[in-house]
């Protein structure tokens, strides 16, 4: 049984899908949900689903190794970023090589980088006139949205598309594929 930690900054719908998926499996389990945002809805979701939560400050994350100690205490094998908006510090990358994955709501390498998250990504895709968008699941490195790509799935962008309608399509793809991909990455560890 491998142990998963999810980092999320906001709503946490992907976190919830992953937690529920692994409730029915014996190869992995979500042990922890960590967030930089004490108002994040993901905290409610995790508590409702019986998953332990940790909230941390910028100082704790970047100037101490408290989070690493917690991950080690819980024997975490894989870190999953599900709508987590801060850059991952070097000490975590070094301690979890090829063991941190992220989901991005567009077809990287397009529409990635600092500040590109959620609605901002969908707005840029629609403005550009691209005929398709999608999701990217990738390993995490020291840059935003830059590590090796593991998986992409696509959806059409209609001429009448709005930020909300595209966000819904993207969330559907994320919920369908992200838990399965987490499982596939777990199997490689
Ligand atoms: C997801 O669409 C995810 O791809 C995106 O944040 C959303 C979180 O939704 N992540 C990024 O934009 C990272 N650059 P959720 O909180 O409902 O899972």
Image (cartoon, grey):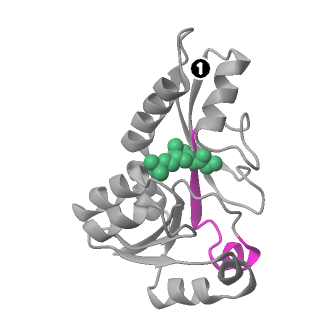
Furthest residue toward front:
39
The answer to whether one can see residue 137 in this image is no
Q: Is 95 colored magenta in this rendering?
A: yes
Furthest residue toward left:
24
Q: Is residue 21 above or below residue 174?
A: below
Q: Residue at x 67, y 17 (%)?
A: 130
**Element at label 1:** strand
**x and y percentages locating residue 31 in the rendered image:** 38, 76
Q: Is residue 179 above or below residue 40?
A: above
Q: Residue at x 52, y 87 (%)?
A: 70
For ligand 1, tell me if the residue under mark 1 lies within 8 Å: no
The answer to whether one can see residue 104 in this image is yes
Given residues 138 and 127, the one toward you in this image is 127
The residue labelled by disc 1 is: 132
Report whether 43 appears left or right of 89.
Answer: left
| Quadrant location, the N terminus | bottom left
Report whether 152 appears left or right of 76.
Answer: right
**Disc count in the image?**
1
**x and y percentages locating residue 106 in the rendered image:** 61, 35
Furthest residue toward top:
159
Q: Residues within 10 Å of mark 1 (few under 14, many from 20)?
A: some
Q: Residue at x 35, y 56 (%)?
A: 16
Residue range in magenta is 89-106
Q: Is 135 colored magenta in this rendering?
A: no
Q: Is residue 44 above or below residue 124?
A: below
Report whether 50 appears left or right of 15.
Answer: left
Q: Quadrant of residue 104?
A: top right
């Amino acid at each position: 049984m491998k142990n998963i930690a999810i980092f999320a900054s906001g709503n946490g719908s992907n976190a919830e899908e992953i937690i529920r998926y692994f409730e029915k499996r014996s190869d992995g389990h979500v042990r922890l949900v960590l967030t930089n945002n004490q108002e994040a809805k993901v905290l409610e979701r995790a508590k409702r689903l019986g998953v332990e939560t940790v909230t941390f400050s910028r100082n704790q994350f970047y100037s101490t190794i408290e989070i690493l100690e917690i991950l080690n205490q819980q024997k975490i094998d894989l870190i999953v970023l599900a709508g987590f908006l801060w850059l991952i510090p070097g000490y975590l990358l070094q301690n979890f090589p090829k063991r941190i994955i992220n989901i991005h709501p567009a077809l990287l390498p397009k529409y990635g980088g600092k500040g590109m998250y959620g609605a901002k990504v969908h707005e840029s895709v629609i403005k550009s006139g691209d005929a398709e968008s999608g999701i990217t699941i990738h390993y995490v490195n020291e840059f935003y949205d830059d590590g090796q790509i593991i998986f992409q799935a696509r959806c059409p962008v209609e001429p009448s598309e709005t930020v909300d309608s595209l966000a819904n399509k993207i969330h559907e793809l994320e919920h369908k594929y992200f838990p399965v991909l987490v499982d596939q990455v777990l199997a490689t560890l």
